[in-house]
Amino acid sequence: MQILHGWLEHGNRSDCEHFDQRPKTNGSYDINLLVIHNISLPPGQFGSDHILDFFAGKLNPQQHDFFKHIYQMRVSSHLLIRRDGKVVQFVSFLDRAWHAGLSSFQGRTRCNDFSIGIELEGTDNSPYSNEQYIALAKVSQTIMHHYPDITLGRIVGHNDIAPQRKTDPGVAFDWCRFRQSIC
């Protein structure tokens, strides 16, 4: 697996307009944090294309009551890893996806400016699939190779950068298994 011009080579892409340019530091991008999230739409349900629609700004509020509360939100992530391990990329790593919201890591705010966001299709309390762990390890290793400032200590959950607001990837995420798989 390779990254070319911010995109996973031979990866699956999905339309997304919810992103903008990252700020540059001394003329280059400062990408040094990987943030792991979870998402399911509707909550607790897997396998539909509602997440893709949500990130594309095309979520139909008539399809589920929950969607009426979120369909106008402008959010995105760089990647989604489906339950079957399929990886979908929405935003180039060179651009700023809108996944972290109000956030801080080691005293630095606005984590979207310097992070890559990966969504796992799941919930805080549902075990993630073996295929997801395999895909997450492969993608993480590729990202770490391409962006060497992202080290093991700079891979965090959304709960770590927004602890008062977020709980994902949740208690079901096996950090030990994941860390061992990328070492």
Image (cartoon, rainbow, N blue to C red):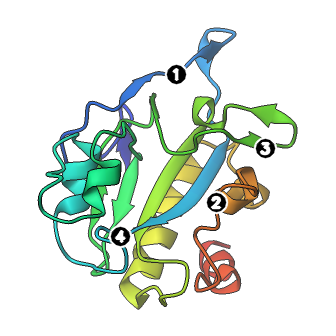
Residue 41, compared with residue 32, is above or below; it is below
Q: Mark 3 = which residue?
A: 105
Q: Earlier in the sequence, mark 2 or mark 1?
A: 1
Q: Earlier in the sequence, mark 3 or mark 2?
A: 3
What residue is drawn where x is 71% and y is 51%?
A: 162
As measured in the structure, the alpha-carbon distance from the residue carrying label 3 to the one carrying label 2 is: 14 Å
Q: Residues within 10 Å of mark 4 (few under 14, many from 20)?
A: some
Q: Mark 2 = which residue?
A: 166
- Residue type at numbered disc 4: Ser
Q: Earlier in the sequence, mark 2 or mark 4?
A: 4
What residue is drawn where x is 36% and y is 84%?
A: 131
Counting labels gives 4
User: Which of the 4 image quadrants contains residue 129?
Assistant: bottom left
Closer to the camera in the image, 149 or 17: 17
What residue is drawn where x is 43% and y is 68%?
A: 120
- Residue type at numbered disc 2: Lys
Residue 153, compared with residue 123, is above or below; it is above
Q: Position of residue 105 (x, y in %)?
A: 78, 44
- Residue type at numbered disc 1: Arg
As measured in the structure, the alpha-carbon distance from the residue carrying label 2 to the one carrying label 4 is: 15 Å
| Residues tagged 2 and 1 counted as in contact (Cβ below 8 A) | no
Q: Say which element carries label 4.
A: loop
Q: Is residue 20 left or right of residue 59?
A: right
Q: Mark 4 = which residue?
A: 40
Q: Is residue 120 left or right of residue 23?
A: left
Q: Earlier in the sequence, mark 1 or mark 4?
A: 1
Q: Mark 1 = which residue?
A: 22
Residue 89, compared with residue 97, is above or below; it is below
Q: Position of residue 89 (x, y in %)?
A: 30, 49
- Residue type at numbered disc 3: Phe
Residue 178, compared with residue 166, is above or below; it is below
| Residues tagged 1 and 4 counted as in contact (Cβ below 8 A) | no
